[in-house]
Each structure stands twice: as structure tokens, then as C-alpha cells.
Image: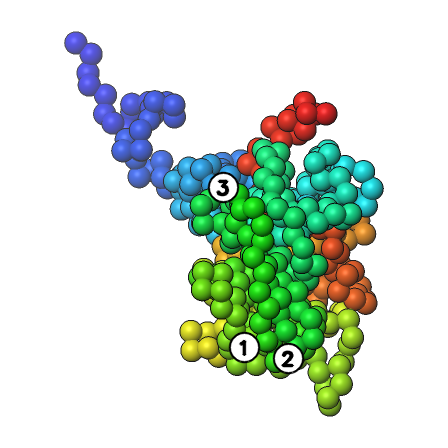
Amino acid sequence: MLPVSSSRQSPPPSPKMASPSSLSLATVSRRGSESPSKKALNLSFADLPSDLLGTIMSYLVLEDNIRASSVCKSWREAAVSVRIVDKHPWLMCFRKRGNLVELRDPLHWNLYTLSLPELADSTVGYSRDGWLLMDKTRSKDVFFFNPFSREVITLPECELDFDRIAFSCPPTSDNCVVVAIRFPDYSATISTCHPGDDKWVTATFPNHIRAHKLSNLVYQNDRFYCFNSEGTLSSFNPSSCRWSYICAPKLRCPYIYDGKYACKEKAVSLAEKEGELFVIFTCSNERPMVYKLLVSLKWEEMSTSTFDGLTIFLGFCNSELRTNLPWMRNNIYFSRFGYNRKRCVSYSFDESRYNPCKEWQNWIELCPPQSLWLDPPPKNVLDLMLSSLHNN
């Protein structure tokens, strides 16, 4: 019988067959004393720098982001830091001639072109929930259009030469109401209509102020809101047909000094998010100013410290707000692309500057009328492109 060998004389187990529990202290000690060159060869994806991991994770859809976060601690931290629960809107740009429109992703700079003959000789009045509210330039026809399904829902002719128009919810809903407003001197003329109605209902209300430089219309909690550069927030309740020309304390325009306008090319926009109203003032290349209406009906100016990751998408027809976009936080994105045609013009509150840095002379430069923010963005752009090719 052969003698039993001691543990010191037995050959070490193969690295492929060894389990973590069978590793001896000597093995661990030897690994701990590995040279830097050997350590570099043993690096894994978990050892990637956090900023590089975050960049990789930012390209994952939400489902894959959640799966990746279960790999290890460093992956989880990177995945959570860039996890986008909110989806950012896309920019839809209408060309001055023809039936082609451009869809642009402001985050990844992707560009897609669609042919939409249904929009010939039409202008956009409002956008919400993937639907566009259009009106013919040479007639009084107003209609809904869905650029993804190409569904058209007609409305009766609108006799009112309106300044602003908006709708409460998708036209496929039973609760949808369309409101068109015109502001003659010291009065407000309002027309309302529901999809399926035979005609619009029009009423005129005293306004007591001369409204000019109007914001877009915003629907919230059964009311349509509008703001003007005189600092007045007005509202209309279509259910009770009640107009309130001032429903909050006046908010003095921040670009007025010594009773004179600091810049004639100033503009005001209105947006809402989860029941809160926000007013955004812009004036050429000056710093945009954002105010939130508190529950106490007081206006609070948003500063860099209170912005808290908010992202604003500003446009001529509509504005959108998001609160969970890690790579776009504390920014205002305007509906104009820069001259390189790759990214939107934006203002960073963290850096206190426009990107690209340029002397913007007026509101139209930053928010051209022929562009709007489309929410929600297309779920499958490839299917959308194939559908466009098939229909043409």
C-alpha cells in the first residue's frame, strides 16, 4: 500500500476546478500580492469608471436598465443614476414647402423624415398626447391629426379668428373639449367645441386688461389657463362657461427696468406638471426665468438650487416639463436646432449659459412657429418609417 501523502506534498487543484471555498489562505495571499500588470489583466466590467458605466447604461431602454442593475453594486448605482422613467418629447419640424416633416430626438440627435400629405397647407395650433390640432391656412377648417396612425378627426368650421387654441385630452375621449380664444381690446371671445358637434359655441367676456404677448394655452384641472406679459394669469372653465381674467397675483415681468422694457423681443410661456403651473420668461439671450405657482397662490422663482433636476422643453405652440431625465436635468431646451443640425439650442442653469453660445436676438430664433414638441415620442421609429414609405 502506498503511503498517504501529506497536504503539503499534494499538487494544488486546477484553477478551473477550484471553488471559492477550497481556496487556501496561501492562494489568497498570493493573489493579494499580484503585480499591477497582472491585476490589469484580471479587470472586469464592474471595474469600469462610473462615468463610463453611466454612459453605457444611458443607451439602454428601461427594461434592460433594470436587468443590468441586478448584476453588481457598481452596475446598480450606474443604472439607477441614468434610469429614465419619464420619456423626453421629440421635436417635430415642418418644412416651409412640401409635405415632409422632420422628427428629431433632442437627446441622441437622431433625425427621421416623414411624408404627411394630410398636413398640406395647414398650420399647427396645439399638440397633446400624440395628437395635433391643425387648421387650414386658406379656410376655417380645424381638424385633429395623429401623425403615427394618420387618423383624421374633423371639426366644424370655426368662425372665430382665434389667437390661441388648445384641447383638454385626446379627441377619442368622450371628455375632449376644444377651446379657441381671441383677445380684442379689453375683452375675451371664446369658442368651444367637442368632437362630433355640429357647430362651435361662442361667448364674449369682459377682460378689464389689454392682453398682449400671450403665452400658449394650458389645460389643468378642468380649466384652460393663459398668461400674458402684463403679469396676469387668466382661466376659463368650459363646463361652467366661466372666464376669470385674473386668478392669481400678478407676476411682474422680470425684463422691465425703470418702467421700460429691457428688450422688446421678450416672450412668456406656460407649462404644467402634475397639477402645478409654471411660467417661463425669455428675452433674447438673457437668462430665462422660471416661476412656479404655489398652493398658496404665490409665485416662487426657481433658482439653480430649487430647480431640482427639472427639464423644460419650450416651444411656440406648446411646452413640456419632465422631472426624471438625468442626462437633461436643469436645462431648458428650445425648439430650434443649432447650426450643426445635431442638437437643440438649450440653456443650462448649472452652467448659466446657452449652448451653443450665441447672441439670440428674438423669440422666433429660439422657438420657430413651424416646430413643436411631440409627446409621447414614437415607440418604434422603424415601423413609422416603413409605414410612411408604404403609404407613399
Task: Decide if residue 314 is in sight here.
Answer: no
Which label belongs to residue 266? none
Residue 136, image x, y percentages? 72, 46
Q: Are marks 2 and 1 in contact (CB under 8 Å)?
A: yes
Which residue is farthest top?
Answer: 1
Instruction: Give the mark nearer the N terminus: 3 vs 1.
Output: 3
Q: Quadrant of the image for the N terminus?
A: top left
Instruction: Give the mark nearer the N terminus: 2 vs 3.
Output: 3
- Amino acid beneath label 2: Ile
Q: Vertically, is 298 above or below 156?
A: below
Q: Are marks 3 and 1 in contact (CB under 8 Å)?
A: no
Which label belongs to residue 172? 3
Residue 184, image x, y percentages? 69, 71
Which residue is farthest bottom?
Answer: 258
Gap in angstroms between the C-alphas marked 2 and 3:
36 Å
Residue at figure coordinates x 78%, y 75% from the top left: 264
| Disc 2 element | loop
Tell me how many marks there are: 3
- Amino acid beneath label 3: Thr
The residue singled out by tag 2 in the image is 209
Judge from the rendering whether residue 13 lies leftward or rightward of residue 235; answer left or right: left
Residue at figure coordinates x 42%, y 37% from the top left: 67
Q: Quadrant of the image for the C terminus?
A: top right
Foreground pick, 59 / 192: 192
Gap in angstroms between the C-alphas marked 2 and 1:
10 Å
- Amino acid beneath label 1: Ile
Instruction: Give the mark nearer the N terminus: 2 vs 1.
Output: 2
